[in-house]
Image: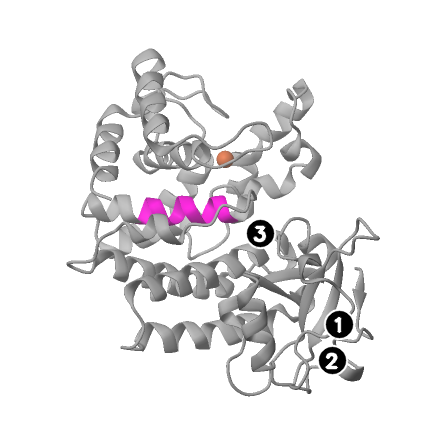
Amino acid sequence: MDSDKSSSFSKGKSGPGETGRVLDFPFSLSEIAATADEDQAQGYAPLPFGHLPEDGPAPFDIYLKIKLKSSPEPRFVLCCPQGQVFPQEWRQKLQQVKISNLYFPVAEVNAVLGHLERRLKEDMESPRRSVLEKAIVSYEVLEVWTRNFFASPQDRADVELNLSLKCIDGLLHLIGQEKVHLGFIFEIRRHDRDRYTHSLNVCLLGLAFVSHLHWDADKARAFGLGALLHDIGLTQVPAEVLKKKGALTADERESVEKHPARGYRILKNFGSISNDALTLVLQHHENGDGSGYPQKMQLADIHPWARILRIVDSFEAMTEDRPWRLARPPRETLQAMCDDWHQSQIYDPVYLKAFIKFLGTL
Ligand SMILES: [Fe+2]
């Protein structure tokens, strides 16, 4: 963990308690970093800028991530200690330079999640918030929750799923509102090139798709939770394998191909996760033509939820940048999926047709 609690952010002339000098610290604004990669391993997790405590003292320490020109390694600099009010001037300045994330110490995650849960409730009930704003709040709270749930095995417990289910319920409610154009789901997606945002995007698009299929709320909610957690087994695959740009060795491929079964094992004792959702996790890389893994199942034997997730997951993955290739545009992605289906029947043709029709409504 590379932190600096004694920097001029927290002490001296430009400390958080002072309001006269905004961001007066010995770093260029261009050195403030906002990417989320590898932070959890260093002991910090990103907090979307919009979730800074608005009034009153911060219930947890808030850090900025700085990349000095003189050092390749980022530093985390305390900018608002727990108990102090985040200066309004700093908020405006950071907004001007489009900083999307600040950071909190992973050790303080419970205080952060408690704060986010209160904010979620207030914002979802507020008549002043638009559908888009409410969707962004739900998505971003779910992002913090997912990052912690994936990265902190010691914190995984049934009760911890409550906040994720509140976010999923909120998103389902917004998706199900009449006269709301679902194009907002493409507006709020973030592509930070990590598995957390990929899981969130699959969950969000999956919720919208099964709502389009007129699933009832309980079934859609259970599917959404499975979609959110479908790749949790990847937390047991070495990071260097997941980031590798070249072809995988046989051992590396075997490690990756174990992730559905590992995910199933991680989740199988959670009472809040349905058997259908567990099966989705286990079978989400099965292909209809028997070329998938881990069991090389044929289409008729694959659970319908896993068949749906295969389509949504592929669409999401192909429209995101990867270390070895750039994102494809959505239209090209759909064409590629149709070609794959015609050639090898990877996808369920009925759901694929419905998915293409659904995308046409967005
Ligand atoms: Fe996967």
- Which element type, helix, strand or loop, lies under badge 2? helix
Region in magenta: 197-207
Alpha carbon of mark 1 to alpha carbon of mark 3: how far?
Answer: 34 Å
Q: Residues within 10 Å of mark 1 (few under 14, many from 20)?
A: some
Reply yes or no: does residue 199 show up in magenta.
yes
**In the foreground, 8 or 113:** 8
The single residue placed furthest to the top in the displayed view is 343
Q: Amino acid at mark 3?
A: Phe
Q: Which residue is mark 2?
A: 14
Q: Residue at x 52, y 60 (%)?
A: 145
x, y percent for residue 51: 50, 70
Q: Is residue 77 left or right of residue 208?
A: right
Q: Which badge, 1 or 2, comes first in the chain's sequence?
A: 2
Q: Which residue is mark 1?
A: 25
Main secondary structure of the magenta stretch:
helix
Q: Which residue is mark 3?
A: 150
Q: Amino acid at mark 1?
A: Phe
Query: How many numbered marks have been drawn onto this rendered protein structure?
Result: 3
- Quadrant of the image occupied by residue 64: bottom right
Reply yes or no: does residue 198 show up in magenta.
yes
Q: Amino acid at mark 2?
A: Ser
Alpha carbon of mark 1 to alpha carbon of mark 2: how far?
Answer: 6 Å
- Quadrant of the image occupied by residue 218: bottom left
Alpha carbon of mark 3 to alpha carbon of mark 2: how far?
Answer: 36 Å
The answer to whether residue 142 shows anywhere in this view is: yes
x, y percent for residue 89: 58, 79
Q: Residues within 10 Å of mark 2 (few under 14, many from 20)?
A: many
